Amino acid sequence: MFPFERLAVVYFALFGAGALLTMPGRPRPWRAILCAGASVVGVIAIASMGSITVRAWLPHGYLVVGYWLPALLVGTVSSSAFEAWLVRTDARIRQHLLPLPRWATDVAELSYLMCYPAVPAAFILVWTRGNLVDVERFWVSVLAAGFACYGNLPWLPSRPPRLLEGSGVSNYARGAHDTGTEHASHALAVINTAVLTRVSHQLNTFPSGHVAVAVAAALSAMTVWWPAGLALAVVAVGIAVGAVAGRYHYAVDVLLGVVVGLGAVVLFAVF
């Protein structure tokens, strides 16, 4: 097995065990446990029979499954002490943030939309310009960053700030509509919201998985070809800014997401 395949097996197995141990009061526990077990079997089977190319590309799927699986244990999320702490912490941090000019809101919204192609783009760079060791390091870092954020969801559930504030769209879309000054960021915010509605479980991951995996992917790609990796790092910064400014995540989610992404790359730089 590649190290990233072992990591995926451990994550899915631990999640299944955690779901089994915390069954009382959890929605759809058996569904989550069966999905976790099937994921473990699937990864092991692919590692045993799949080609190198298939095994190198499939972690995109492991990341997606790792994102959706914890949501099976989360029912309707209501106000909680943890969510209240997020709101209070966010308010304190945002007091020290400067408002973005119009052009920056456009860039921030566009950057946040890039959180979906960021990992595939970074992987293609590593796949085409690196070697198998680079691919292993890339996926270990990215999967570790993502799993560290996704796995907390059933035990630290919360709603994203854009939903708590009474609307599914971000600040940009609401503000532009309210003031009659619609511009590019309004359209991008509407697109972001539509995408999130279709590909997201509409829950808040703590820390921010989008930010963590974008940072880990960019830094991993930088070791293969630093100019392109640097460009991806700029995109990752934009994703972080857009996540806070557009109210897709709390500021503390984003800050910890950066820490997790950096930590995953440093921790697994040599294995």
Image (cartoon, rainbow, N blue to C red):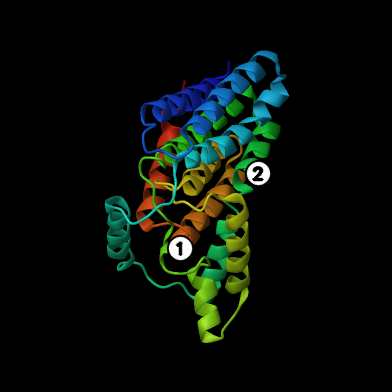
Three-letter amino acid code at the position of disc 2: Ala
Q: Earlier in the sequence, mark 2 or mark 1?
A: 2
3D distance between C-alphas at marks 2 and 1: 30 Å
The picture quadrant where one finds residue 52 is: top right
**Residue lying at 64% horizontally and 17% vertically, measured from the top left:** 45
Give the number of the disc on residue 121: 2
Give SS at disc 2.
helix
**Residue lying at 33% horizontally and 54% vertically, measured from the top left:** 83
Q: Between 156 and 50, which is closer to the camera in this rendering?
A: 156
**Residue lying at 49% horizontally and 42% vertically, measured from the top left:** 71
Give SS at disc 1.
helix
The picture quadrant where one finds residue 60 is: top right
Q: Are marks 2 and 1 in contact (CB under 8 Å)?
A: no
- The residue identified by callout 1 is 163
Give the number of the disc on residue 13: none
73 relative to 50 in the view: left or right: left
Which of the two discs, 2 and 1, sits closer to the camera?
A: 1
Image x and y of residue 120, in percent:
65, 41
Q: Is residue 105 visible?
A: yes
Q: Between 147 and 158, which is closer to the camera in this rendering?
A: 158
Q: Between 221 and 29, which is closer to the camera in this rendering?
A: 29
Residue 200 sits above or below residue 134 on the image: below
47 relative to 170 in the view: left or right: right
Image x and y of residue 148, in percent:
42, 36
